Image: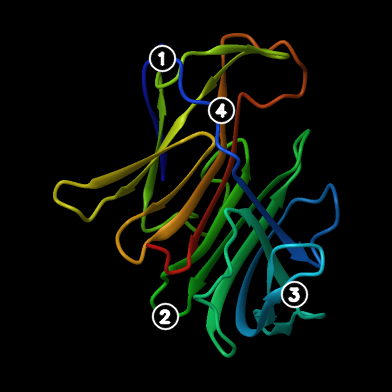
Amino acid sequence: EETTGGTTGGELCDPPSDVAFEFQLVPGPEDFVDVEYDWLCTVQEVAPYKDGGTGVTMSCTDGDETVSPDPTLVIDAKPATDLVAFSKGMAVRMVYGQAVPWWTERWVRVESVGSGDLLIAGTSGSGLAPSEIVDLFAPFNVEVMEGVCAPQEDFCGTIERLEVDFIEPQGDPPIAYPVLDGTFEVIAGDPGISTWVVTAQGFVGEIQCTDTPSHWYSIGMVFDGNE
């Protein structure tokens, strides 16, 4: 669930940190195709990937059909993650999607079968609720806060760095974990959930470029036992 709050204004924020979160399904969907997979999988191997990062290779089914060849989900992040919560034989559900308006949006969620506990979530796109199947960042609600950083001029107009609040709604009161654009944090307890907000930005006013989304988010979450 995604909402937006705050007011435009803000202050000069510290520069973004050197953070990165890339996710890729190998083999992945064809280019320029809108698709969303919902697979039940068994983890076969967790190992360093040849092009960098860590890969989780799984045997999966799509309904009654076997997915062939076995897919590998590759996570390449800075700070790095070894995906230590995954082990051979684990039963997981993976939702992976792609949408192509004038640009490519992608998202992924991997959760434990049965409990539905978050293991991996990631998105690269113009919104934080792209999936038609799952709530990508559950159990967290996600709220985008404007007015935290002063807007700055960009090639395509005036752009603002945003704060993403990950909210545990079951708390009394609910607990919010704020993570600013260009920041890595471990949130929600010990062990916690590693959270990369690589990009959370939006235009203020008119956009000077064509075929350009008003907002862009590149975010990853991994349950990997970090403290």
What is the spatial separation of the Cα atoms under label 3 and label 2, in whole angstroms? 21 Å
Q: Provide residue 135's location: percent of width, then percent of height.
A: 46, 55
Q: Quadrant of the C terminus?
A: bottom left
* Disc 3 packing (10 Å; few <14; some 14–19; many ≥20): some
> Are the residues tagged 3 and 2 within 8 Å (C-beta)?
no
Left or right side of 75 for 13: left
Residue type at mark 2: give it: Gly
Q: Mark 1 or 2, which is nearer the eye? A: 1
Residue 92 position, x and y percent, is 54, 78
Which is closer to the viewer, label 3 or label 1?
A: 1
Give coordinates of residue 75: x percent, y percent: 66, 61
Q: Is residue 183 left or right of residue 44?
A: left
- Earlier in the chain: of badge 3 and badge 2, it is 3
* Mark 1 touches mark 4? (CB < 8 Å): no
- Report, in whole angstroms, how far the alpha carbon at label 1 lies from the one at label 2: 45 Å
Between residue 70 and residue 88, name the one nearer to us.
Answer: 88
Label 1 sits on what residue type?
A: Glu
Q: Which residue is mark 3?
A: 71
Q: What residue would you read off at disc 2?
A: 114
Mark 2 secondary-structure assignment: loop
**3D distance between C-alphas at marks 1 and 4:** 15 Å
Residue named by callout 4? 201
**Callout 4 touching callout 3 (CB < 8 Å):** no
**Mark 2 or mark 4, which is nearer the start of the sequence?**
2
Disc 4, disc 2: CB below 8 Å?
no
